Image (cartoon, helix red, strand yellow):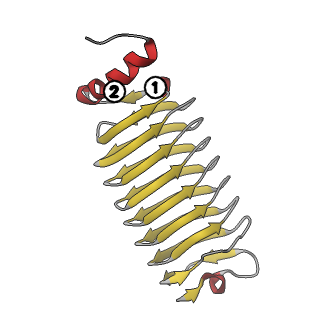
Amino acid sequence: MTHGGAYIDDGGYIEGHTITNTDFSNTSNDALRVLDTTFTGCTFTETTWARAHISDATFTRCTMLGWTIPHSGLHDVTITDCRIGGLNAAASALRRVTIHGGKIDYLNLRDATLTDMTLRDVTIGELDVMGATLTNVTVTGTRITTLMMKDARCTNVDLRGADLTTVTNHEGLRGTTMRIDQFIDIAPQLAHIMGITLD
């Protein structure tokens, strides 16, 4: 497998490449710029791209077991059928990002800004949007075991296509749209928080 460093030029850019079966593991690059590039079958294990700018990029069937991209900007990015152990995009700005298929153990979007984002047919263990700002976010065909919503700010967030097991800090659901049966499912959690006994 080719090492990913070969694609990073001296100016800290990865631009205009089609990258296949390449290993970016155990690397750290600050303020990396990734433009107009496709990644297929690549590995990002313990990979840190802090303050990165990723635009017009696709990631397909990649393995990400500890991909850390805090304080980054992701614009027009598609992640398809990837196996993600942990993705840390805390305090990042994601615009027109689609995650389609695959499995994610922990998706850290804490304090991030999410705009025009879609989660479709994904299995997510923990989705952390605590302190995040979500605008025009759609979740369809997606199973989320734990959704962490503390201090989240939501505008036009559609959760009707989500299979939710546990939601924490329910006040963060203000501004979302849910199905009636979803609300019934979390009603016991709400009752417990409010000190209501259900009989």
- Residue 159 place in picture, x, y as percent: 35, 37
Q: Could you say which is closer to the camera, residue 54 or residue 107?
A: 107
**Residue 184 location in percent, x, y?**
27, 24
Q: Residues within 10 Å of mark 2 (few under 14, many from 20)?
A: some
Q: Quadrant of residue 157?
A: top left
Q: Total number of numbered labels?
A: 2
Q: Which mark is residue 186?
A: 2
Percent of width and height locating residue 78: 44, 62
129 relative position to 82: left or right? right
Report the front residue among 142 and 195.
195
Q: In the rendered view, would you say 87 is above or below 130?
A: below
How far apart marks 2 and 1 lie (CA) works out to: 9 Å
Q: Residue 146, relative to residue 108: is it above or below?
A: above
In the rendered structure, which disc, 2 or 1, sits on the residue that comes first in sequence?
Answer: 1
Q: Position of residue 133 (x, y in %)?
A: 56, 36
Farthest residue in the bottom direction?
Answer: 1
Question: Element type at marker 1?
Answer: helix
Would you name the residue on which mark 1 appears? 170
The kind of residue tagged 2 is: Ile
Left or right: residue 73 versus residue 39 is right
Q: Residue at x 70, y 58 (%)?
A: 51
The amino acid type of the residue labelled 1 equals His
Classify the position of the C terminus by image quarter: top left
Most foreground residue, 167 or 70: 167
Q: Quadrant of residue 83?
A: bottom left
Q: Disc 2, disc 1: CB below 8 Å?
A: yes
Q: Is residue 166 visible?
A: yes
- Disc 2 element: helix
Q: Residue at x 66, y 68 (%)?
A: 33
Dot 1 alpha-carbon crowd within 10 angstroms: few under 14, some 14 to 19, many 20 or more: some
